[in-house]
Amino acid sequence: MFSSRTRWDRTENRLARVLTARRAAGAEVLDLTVSNPTHAGLTAPADALAPLAAPEALRYDPDPRGLEAARAAVAADAARRGQRVAPEGIVLTASTSEAYALAFKLLCDPGDAVLAPTPSYPLFDFLATLESVALVPYALLHDGAWHLDVGSLAAAVGERTRCVIVVNPNNPTGSYLKRGEADALLDLCAERGLAVLSDEVFGDCAFEDDAERVTSVDGGDRALALSFGGLSKSCGLPQLKLGWIAVSGPATLRDEALDRLEIADDTYLSVGTPVQVAAPALLARREEFQAPIRARVARNLAALRSRVAGSAASLLEPEGGWSAVLRVPATLSEEDRVSALVERRGVLVHPGYFFDFHREAYLVLSLLTPAETFDRGVDLLLADLAAAPVL
């Protein structure tokens, strides 16, 4: 009766079982994986939602690409990060996940392939499966800093490849695309007839300036590029469900993509009117909304650096984002390690395999975690690493 696209393995894994048992017993869990700012003591100001009550929000006058004022505000925000796009080149969505779904519908027939970086966020597997496309990995390499492996990317291109995903900065590595890498990517896509899907939701979350960094991918006159963003990360407002696609590239490809996306978006009209009406006011307060998040992330990153110094763990320095990656001794498998951390110490972290790291052993921590919980959790994690590996 049911589609093969939803035939997922729903068996509870070992970490989930251990976590459920600990919580059922009423024992404390120090959660170092929280990535939702509204669950991390980072709630936006109470008046943040006031623009949703504007009288204009009571009128339903849908535009398939999104209300013009909202698209103009998104285009202006994109220009701030170097993306040259007119409001006509913006398509609003209800989320970045919906943006991916629309992009896959636009570019792929069932059975076509999409290239995605590893390590990176595991949501891509689900999005690709639901759109009946194949997800093919290419590598990000680490040699003291993270790099797009252009050779791995080129080797992964097959006859049915239609597009390449880049996450900029990547989640969880926090690495940005550099100018030389972006040029190589666009040249490859132009040569092979591929589109670029650039996920830029964490684009404003850089820790330091870098002249070599590409903050937004612009296809220019080379390749079709769809750049994704949203209020979830740019304003720390995931509950408002507004994302967008900025389309760039050669005029013929760009205009054809926009015309097709307009019809696809018109089929759903999933973006609510109030959040579109509120978008200009919300984006105008972006810095205010981001300030407490930036402060939390910077504080926790500094605390983590200090704590891991001289320990068995090493920090793979991020350039931005909300996560930190620790390399730890591979004396235990990642599954054993994270399960034991919950059982013995009451500390929850993500294992590297959750993000498709190429080898063990890595742990991923959220830098959004409240400071007291973060410090206690990291101290217990490091104490566990220093102890004998007994299970």
Image (cartoon, rainbow, N blue to C red):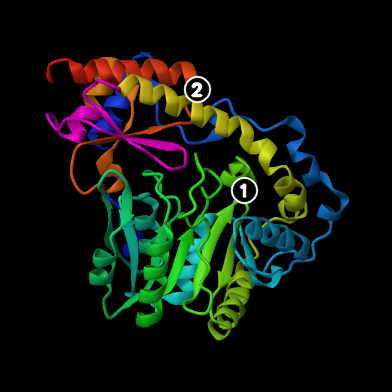
- Give me the residue at 37% from left, 21% from top: 306
Residue 235 spot, x, y in % from top left: 63, 43
Tell me residue 161's x, y (percent): 32, 75
Q: From what the image shows, is residue 375 above or below residue 118?
A: above
Looking at the picture, which amino acid does disc 1 mark?
Leu
Name, please, the residue furthest toward the front.
211
Q: Nearer the viewer, residue 7 or 95?
A: 95
What's under tag 2, amino acid-wise?
Pro
Q: Is residue 266 visible?
A: yes
Within the magenta stretch, is there residue 319? yes
Numbered circle sitting on residue 231: 1
Q: If you read the primary sequence from the N terminus, does the residue marked by circle 1 or circle 2 appear first?
A: 1
Residue 109: image quadrant is: bottom left
Residue tagged by mark 2? 370
Front residue of 293 and 212: 212
User: Dot 2, how many residues are within 10 Å of its Cα: few (below 14), some (14-19), or many (20+)?
Assistant: many
Mark 1–mark 2 distance (CA, rounded to whole Å): 22 Å
The answer to whether 164 is drawn above or below residue 234 in the figure is below
Q: Which residues are magenta?
A: 309-338
Q: Is residue 310 left or right of residue 178?
A: left
